Image (cartoon, rainbow, N blue to C red):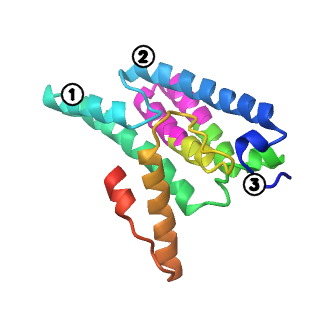
Amino acid sequence: LYPKVPLDKRPDFYKILSVAGLYTIISGMINGIAVVELTTPVGYTSGGCVNAGRFYAAGDMKQGSKVLAMCTLYYAGGILAGLWPKGCDGDLVFEGKTSPGMLLSSLLVLLGIWLKRHRERPTLAMQCWALSQGLMNATSTSFSAVPMRATHTAGGQTDAAISLGKAFMNFLRGEVVPCQRKVYLNA
């Protein structure tokens, strides 16, 4: 629909801001619930890793493992986007097309709600939300006009996960795997 141009040159600038705001509000609500339920956010990994370390240092292996699983699933969302770049194209929403990555992210949020309300499984719900947030952030990051960090502002983990997924796909296709130095530095 629109040529891939810088954000300030796009005629749909206000639509982009509105969608980015909506993504951020959704992510903020999910993270707020996660903090209340499990004392750690699910929408990024730095806070979660700090909390996992805090729990492990206090000898609470069970809680630390729950939080570390959420961090891992968040990272897995980025890897999924790297493995499935056509489905996790951040431009699809702005081109009036269905974004499979965002749709899957939404379904994971709904699954988490169902698990919490109907199965009384808050930890499993949080893990679904972590995967959802990793996928949402990786998909919105791939927006061509500007990386839209919907779940948080720092994107080292997301970029590393996407790069790892893309490298794996190159490996499977027998193509050259690009240098993964950034992946290891950010991970």
Residue at left offset 67%, top offset 48%: 90
Q: Is residue 20 above or below residue 37?
A: below
Task: For the residues labelled 1 and 2, say whether their Cβ atoms are less than 8 Å apart.
Answer: no
3 vs 1, front mark? 3
Q: Amino acid at mark 2?
A: Val
- 4 or 64: nearer the viewer: 4
SS at mark 3?
loop
Nearer-N-terminus badge (3/2): 3
Residue 54's mark?
A: 1
Name the kind of residue labelled 3 in the image: Lys
Dot 2 lies on which element? helix
Residue 169, placed above or below residue 102: below
Q: Is residue 98 left or right of residue 65?
A: right
- What is the distance, in whole Å, between disc 3 and disc 1 at their CAs? 44 Å
Q: Which residue is mark 3?
A: 4
**Residue drawn 62% across the image and 44% down it:** 140
Query: What's the magenta region?
Result: 109-133
